[in-house]
Amino acid sequence: MSFFGNILRACALGAAVAVAAWNPAAAQENPSAVIDEIRASGELKIPVMVGEEPGYIKDPATGAWSGFYVDFLTEVATELGVKVTPVETTWGNLAADFQSNKIDVAIGVNPNPKRGLVVDYLWEPLFTDAWAVFSPKGKPVATWAELNTPEKTVVVQKGSTMQIVAEALLPKATITVVEDRNLAIMELQAGRADAMIQSVFDVLQIAQQVGGEVSVPEPMLRNPATLAVARKAGNAGFINFLTNWVQQQRSLGLAQGRLAKSWEDRGIDLSILPDNFSF
């Protein structure tokens, strides 16, 4: 080989080494690694939560889980050719569950920056919710400003997006933080709180169970319910798969139809939702 040929060959090798050094993960990472891992395990680990009907419903006799969130993720598992494995947790523990590999995917979550440091959210929401207020009978809440006074106590769940909403919009109110929805309802029923913040669909469920007022205060705060996966190497293919699944669910009306049926099956009247609200 000529002198110039050796120089060209050396340059080419140097360029290849430089590219690999600049981004070694690009050459080594398998974008389907997470999907392969899930399929190899034979299970899709999903979070489930007590007291979060109708999204999560636990049969007290058998311990079996159902509900529309479980139905959605069971369909995802079926597409992947695996079974669903429920992991009991809370909204506030989701980030830690992802980091410890206890769960593979969460559904109905609201993006927030802190959790976004360790979790990847899908940009396309499965459906759109709104933040609502549950209050005692005869005491509806027309605007968020009505709760933003020192005389008002608002109860929220620890580590939830509801807590962020309350702390941002109601700095003058007293915010009571509890572990789960049932404890929040107890605070309200005991007269220790004037209102609790939940998604509007959850408030409809609570009102049907215990009675009370359902309000979607102005200004209406839209609430995207999306999916999330752990941020780790090889999850690009999993995110792509889930994004396509979500887009199909929304574009064909499958998600909206399933949600409406879930509430109708439980006797929940969706007609009380504001006219300018759609999911």
Image: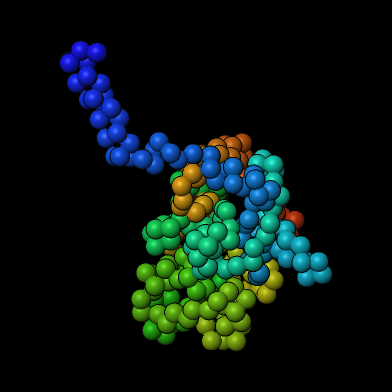
The answer to whether residue 121 is left or right of residue 188 is left
The image shows residue 225, relative to residue 132, as above or below, that is above
* Relative vertical location of residue 247 with respect to residue 114 in this rendering, above or below: above
**Residue 266 shown left or right of residue 51 in the figure:** right
Q: Write the residue at 75% across / 56% down.
A: 265
Does the rendering let one see residue 9? yes
Chosen colour scheme: rainbow
Q: Nearer the viewer, residue 127 or 28?
A: 28
Task: Please indicate whether residue 216 sits to the left or right of residue 265 in the image.
Answer: left
Quarter of the view holding residue 218: bottom left
Furthest-right residue in view? 61
Q: Locate residue 209, reporting x and y percent.
A: 69, 71
**In this orientation, which residue lies closer to the viewer: 233 or 2?**
2
Which image quadrant is residue 214 in?
bottom right
Give the residue displayed 53% in from the left and 39% down from the top.
32
Q: Quadrant of the N terminus?
A: top left
Q: Residue at x 68, y 75 (%)?
A: 210
Residue, far top: 2
Q: Quadrant of residue 152?
A: bottom left
Count of labels in the image? 0
- The outermost residue toward the left is 3
Q: Position of residue 142 (x, y in %)?
A: 47, 68
Q: Is residue 267 visible?
A: no
14 to 201, vertically: above or below: above
What percent of the width, then of the height, locates residue 114? 39, 62
Q: Could you tell me which residue is drawn at 43 percent across and 58 percent down? A: 118
Residue 171 % position (x, y): 35, 76
Asked if 28 appears above or below 190 in the picture, the reply is: above
Q: Nearer the viewer, residue 38 or 75?
A: 38
